[in-house]
Amino acid sequence: MGEQRNSYRILVANPEERPLGRPIDNIKTDLREIGWCDMEWIELALDRDQWKGLVNTNHTSTTPLEDMAAARAVNPSNQCLKVFVQRDYSEGTLVKFQTRFPTELEDRVERQAFEYTVNQLNAMYAEAEKAGCSTYCEGCMACLTAYLIYICTETHYEKCLRKVAKFIVEQNERVYAPRGLLITDPTERGLRVVSLLLYNQDISLLSLLLFSVAGSAVTKLYPASWGCVSVEVGRQTKRYYSRIAALVDLSGVFPPIPTPFNEDESIAYDKLARNIQHWEKIPFQGYVVQGSNGEYPLMTSQERVEMVSRVRQLIAPDRLLIAGSSCESTRNTVELSNKMAAAGANAVMVVNPSYYKNSMTAEALIRHYKTVADLSSIPVIVYNMPANTGIDLTADIITQLAEHPNIIGLKDSGGDIAKISRVVSLTRHYKFQVLAGSTGFLLPALLVGCVGGINALANILGDEVCDIYKFFTKDKLQEAVELHLRLVTPNAMVTRELGVPAMKEAMNMMGLYGGPCRQPLQPLTDSERRRVRDAFIKNGFHPKC
């Protein structure tokens, strides 16, 4: 999606009727050209006469940000009023909504029907919260048993959210849509409010959203003759339900791969292919491209997207690809995130802006991340890197971000296990996945509930870092501790002590291609090279070159 190019809301006809007179494949090509591809499509209920009325509005031009912000752009020709049912905090943080009847609904729906809907939602959330709180051992965070219970409670909570989604679809179909109303799932607004849309006409056919969880076919529930697909709404729906459907499972080890450069600082794509050929033999969950170790601040946006595209082509289809889309401005981060999605990324990883450090208040940071999450077509992972940014995201900020349906996880490179434990505890109900940002604290992080790690040392000793995760999952903690102690010193050498140049030197040493860094990063001195080599040899990891 270029900076000067408009995006479009495109209504795609049923391939059997094709009132637009264009093949579906051609329309898919159009979507790819404006930066949308592989989107989840969702059906809208339309009868034939209503569809004919929309044929002439199939390409409604808007600006990119306006278009992506239109999460409810299902009926562009009609304006609608929004009514919000607020949270009830009389019982603390339990998810509960007020049953006070909004005056805007007096002539639209019966008070008893409204109260029944809210009371049922409250009962479902109470059931989910009850299981989540009473079965979790607060005092045993580091215990493997508590970790297993943590997984089980999340599974129960996920099932409860599915019940809520199904209940809302049923209520819309039977009660609200025939009265020109549309009630939305509270998950869409981070469980903060329930919103109702008030239309000027009966929307039982025109604007009833049929939400699909985990890509289930809408035609199993509704007639296939309702033949309109809204790509924009589908993209939004997929995003809101990405966490519930567990589309992006971050459990495991991810290497944040370096960008290989030639001596003239051009990107050595042939060396990239050689490195990935080696890494593909290691049981990684996926890869991170354009993180700190990828030297992303030293690259153009075009190079960053191209790296994502090349890696996607080189790795197995089932490997997750996380792309670093961080920019100093919110707008640029949004645009780059969606370009990386089009290039094949499964999720984006975003470090906080830091140039205007004194202005990066909690409010500014929260707004930045939530805006990116609102407008990104793929899930967002928060990246906390205080050593580079000078800003350490607090547990309270992270917890507020975890409420957003499209913010699915955190990479924390700060290394404060106490804070990581608190984040895991406070966000467990949201299926929020926390990743250790360094091998130096990967094992302790797993013990307190993290699901894996994004670890620079995995570029060099991938099998060994994956063994830490494997030993933990198989309850072989003694083996995990022994291996952890051998990895601490080499890890420190290629991260906080000597950084990216040392990581690339260690890759060269182990038979991979590290190559030079881009300036202003400088190559290691001879004495620094010896330090790197000694750190590996003394812990039993012998160079191959």
Image (cartoon, rainbow, N blue to C red):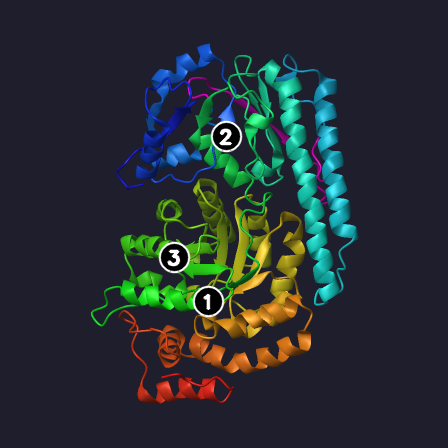
The location of residue 382, given as percent across then percent down, is: 50, 55
Main SS type for the magenta part? loop
Say which residue appears at 47% left-offset and 19% top-offset: 79
Q: Residues within 10 Å of mark 1 (few under 14, many from 20)?
A: few
Say which residue appears at 40% left-offset and 25% top-offset: 12
Q: Amino acid at mark 2?
A: Ile
Q: Nearer the viewer, residue 459 or 72?
A: 459
User: Which quarter of the picture shows residue 57?
Assistant: top left
Residue found farthest to the left:
264
Q: Nearer the viewer, residue 511 or 67?
A: 511
Q: Is residue 430 magenta?
A: no
Label 2: state its secondary structure: strand
Q: Amino acid at mark 3?
A: Tyr
* Placement of 336 over or under 137, stated as above or below: above
Return the disc, 3 or 1, that comes first in the chain's sequence.
1
Q: Nearer the viewer, residue 212 or 398?
A: 212
The location of residue 18, given as percent across then percent down, is: 38, 20
Q: Is residue 189 left or right of residue 348?
A: right
Q: Which residue is mark 2?
A: 42
For the C terminus, give its image quadrant.
bottom left
Q: Which residue is mark 3?
A: 356
Q: Which residue is mark 1?
A: 281
